[in-house]
Image (cartoon, helix red, strand yellow):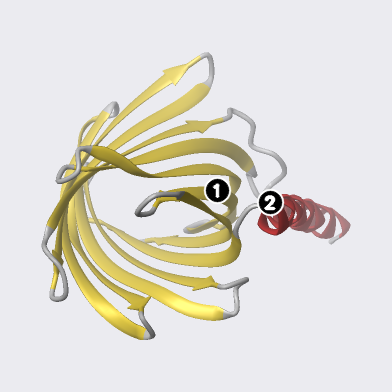
């Protein structure tokens, strides 16, 4: 029992440290936000899986609910180093006081490799963004993730770093960057989670703005 409480305390301490880091940036730079992600993954066979995801975001110093998305995706693992898939995402984002809809089919490919015990994932994603209120857009996203080899305590706490870029084809320009610092952990046999700090930098009409995000994720595998 004491061992369990100690390991749980370590998780809480990690989360508090990330929270404090985000607050420092929030006061100095931009808005503080809270994002929560829920993922359910169903294994079809040895190499393929079906996944559902929901995400909810709170901005304006985490006081205002402004974003939600729901998606379904399929992925096939050709080798342990290459995964390919696609899916569909439905987004509702608050703009001018109203939630507006975006429909976004996508395809994605992920390269994976191991280097001196470090796990690397290079995720590539092409999105077609369909709107009722503005012209449709094409966007490319690339997310490079580095997972450290340590798995601390029975919760298997594993730190990671990641960076994701967003490229808009219409303007031929980078429109957004996300830097992640966090850790994943295992709660039960088929249930895992993440806590992370995210610095999002977005290009507006003439300036770049920052958002400082405290994020959580729950993943259930069947």
Mark 2, secondary structure of its residue: helix
Quadrant the N terminus occupies = bottom right
Quadrant the C terminus occupies = bottom left
Tag 2: Cα neighbours inside 10 Å, few (<14), some, or many (≥20)?
Answer: some
Badge number at residue 53? none
Horizontal arrangement in the rendering, residue 57 relative to residue 31 (left or right): left
**Residue 112, position as x, y percentages in the image:** 34, 28
**Residue 156, position as x, y percentages in the image:** 63, 44
Query: Where does label 1 land, which residue?
Result: 199
**Residue 25, position as x, y percentages in the image:** 68, 51
In the foreground, 22 or 14: 22
Q: Quadrant of residue 74?
A: bottom left
Horizontal arrangement in the rendering, residue 30 relative to residue 176 (left or right): right
Residue at the farthest front position: 206
At a point 49% along the width and 37% down the height, the residue shown is: 162
Query: Where does label 2 land, which residue?
Result: 25
Q: Earlier in the sequence, mark 2 or mark 1?
A: 2
Vertical order, 218 against 139 (above or below): below
At a point 57% along the width and 67% down the height, the residue shown is: 34
Residue at the farthest top position: 116
Q: Quadrant of residue 173?
A: top left
Mark 1, secondary structure of its residue: strand
C-alpha distance separating marks 2 and 1: 9 Å
Tag 1: Cα neighbours inside 10 Å, few (<14), some, or many (≥20)?
Answer: many
In the foreground, 135 or 216: 135
Residue at the farthest bottom position: 98
At a point 47% along the width and 70% down the height, the residue shown is: 57
Vertical order, 125 against 4 (above or below): above
Q: Quadrant of residue 9?
A: bottom right
Q: Are marks 2 and 1 in contact (CB under 8 Å)?
A: yes
In the foreground, 108 or 84: 108
At a point 42% along the width and 50% down the height, the residue shown is: 202
């Amino acid at each position: 029992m004491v061992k369990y409480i100690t390991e749980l305390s370590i998780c809480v301490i990690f989360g508090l440290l990330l929270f404090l880091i985000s607050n420092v940036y929030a006061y100095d730079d931009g808005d503080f936000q809270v994002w929560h992600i829920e993922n359910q993954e169903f294994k079809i066979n040895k190499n393929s899986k079906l996944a559902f995801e929901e995400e909810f975001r709170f901005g304006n110093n985490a006081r205002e609910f402004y974003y939600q998305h729901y998606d379904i995706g399929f992925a096939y693992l050709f080798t342990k180093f290459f995964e390919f898939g696609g899916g569909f995402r439905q987004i509702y984002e608050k703009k001018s006081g109203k939630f507006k809809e975006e429909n976004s089919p996508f395809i994605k490919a992920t390269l994976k490799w191991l280097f001196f015990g470090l796990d690397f994932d290079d995720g590539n994603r092409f999105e077609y963004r369909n709107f009722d209120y503005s012209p449709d857009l094409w966007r490319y996203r690339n997310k490079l993730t580095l997972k450290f080899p340590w798995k601390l305590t029975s919760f298997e706490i594993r730190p990671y770093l990641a960076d994701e870029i967003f490229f808009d084809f219409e303007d031929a320009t980078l429109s957004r960057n996300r830097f992640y610092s966090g850790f994943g952990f295992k709660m039960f046999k088929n249930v895992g989670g993440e806590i992370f700090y995210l610095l999002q930098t977005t290009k507006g009409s003439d300036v770049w703005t920052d958002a400082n995000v405290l994020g959580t994720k729950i993943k259930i595998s069947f």
